[in-house]
Image (cartoon, grey):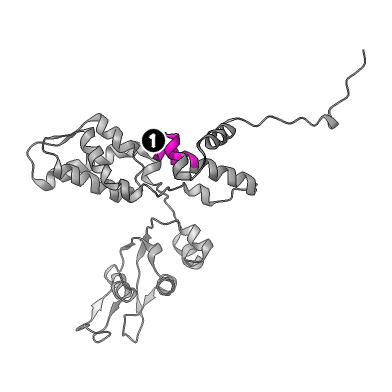
Amino acid sequence: LPDALIESELFGFEKGAFTGAAGRKKGLFEVAENGTLFLDEIGELKHELQAKLLKAIDQQRIRRLGGTKDIHCNVRLLAASSRNLQRMVRVGTFRDDLYYRIAVLELDIPPLRERPDDIRELVCRQLVAEHARAGGTAPLQIEERALSELSSYNWPGNIRQLQNVVARLACDVSSQTISAAHVRGELTRFKNLDADTIILPDSCSTLLAGEGLEEFSCRVRSSLIESVKNRMDGHMTQAARRLKFDRSALHKMINRMNTPAKEEVDYGNAPASEDV
């Protein structure tokens, strides 16, 4: 949404504040007075709006677009973001003062690819919802192999992509049972979309305590290779091609990463043997 539209939705506007503002309108802060306001994807806000949001939270006051007086507001704020806000603070795209103001109690939900065990419950729950929405008489069933296909997929689009796939399966399946073939057919639609995109865990963006450049590089390299291997279903030739790396050299690199380093002994400090 345009910044001006987001601002008008949050803080409201007065009559004549902009073209089409035929009357006064309360913003979400006023509507949620003495209640809870949920802001989804807060990481998408531009810096100017972040500053205005911070002022509203700090001072508990907002001003409508085109207004001349401040309005008191008392709301409990909940915010969510699919982006890593800490990383955005480090690179300067999200204000640190706003982050520390809203990050009082944080709930970190890992991406779907890191919690495949949740997929079964999410899929079954949505199938029930889709069945009720369609007004069907018999509930949809899903094969165990179909659930395995869904659980092993990487889900670069996270929960929204899963919802999209399940909704299409519920609409397109001709029988009352969703098979593994149905699932593979749906997932094929996304291959051209995400085949060249490899998503690494958030931990690969953080230099751990006591870690140097070499250790960090090895950890990221290992994670990247593992992610590409999984994306290519374990086919080393395809993985090497995607990484633009020689296949045999990639094999050797993987073997080195999987081989524990030999413990080095400092013989210069070792105790001298006793003569017998």
Q: Which residue is mark 1?
A: 233
> At x 38% / y 58%, what residue is drawn?
81
Q: Which residue occupies the foreground of this view, 172 or 188?
A: 188
Q: Is residue 247 magenta?
A: no
Horizontal side of residue 251 vs 122, given as left or right = right
Secondary structure that dominates the magenta span: helix
Give the structural element (helix, strand or loop) at label 1.
loop
Horizontal side of residue 55 vs 1, given as left or right = right
Residue 36 quadrant: bottom left
Horizontal side of residue 242 vs 33, given as left or right = right
How many residues crowd around disc 1 within 10 Å: few (fewer than 14), some, or many (20 or more)? Answer: few
Q: Amino acid at mark 1?
A: Asp
Residue 132 quadrant: top left
Residue 65 is situated, as x and y percent measured from the top left of the image, at 31, 81
Residue 274 is situated, as x and y percent measured from the top left of the image, at 90, 18
Residue 227 is situated, as x and y percent measured from the top left of the image, at 45, 41
Residue 24 is situated, as x and y percent measured from the top left of the image, at 23, 81
Q: Is residue 211 visible?
A: no
> At x 19% / y 46%, what residue is drawn?
168
Magenta residues span: 225-239
Q: Quadrant of the C terminus?
A: top right
- In the displayed structure, 60 sits above or below 212; it is below
Q: Is residue 207 visible?
A: yes
The number of numbered badges drawn on the structure is 1
Q: Is residue 229 magenta?
A: yes
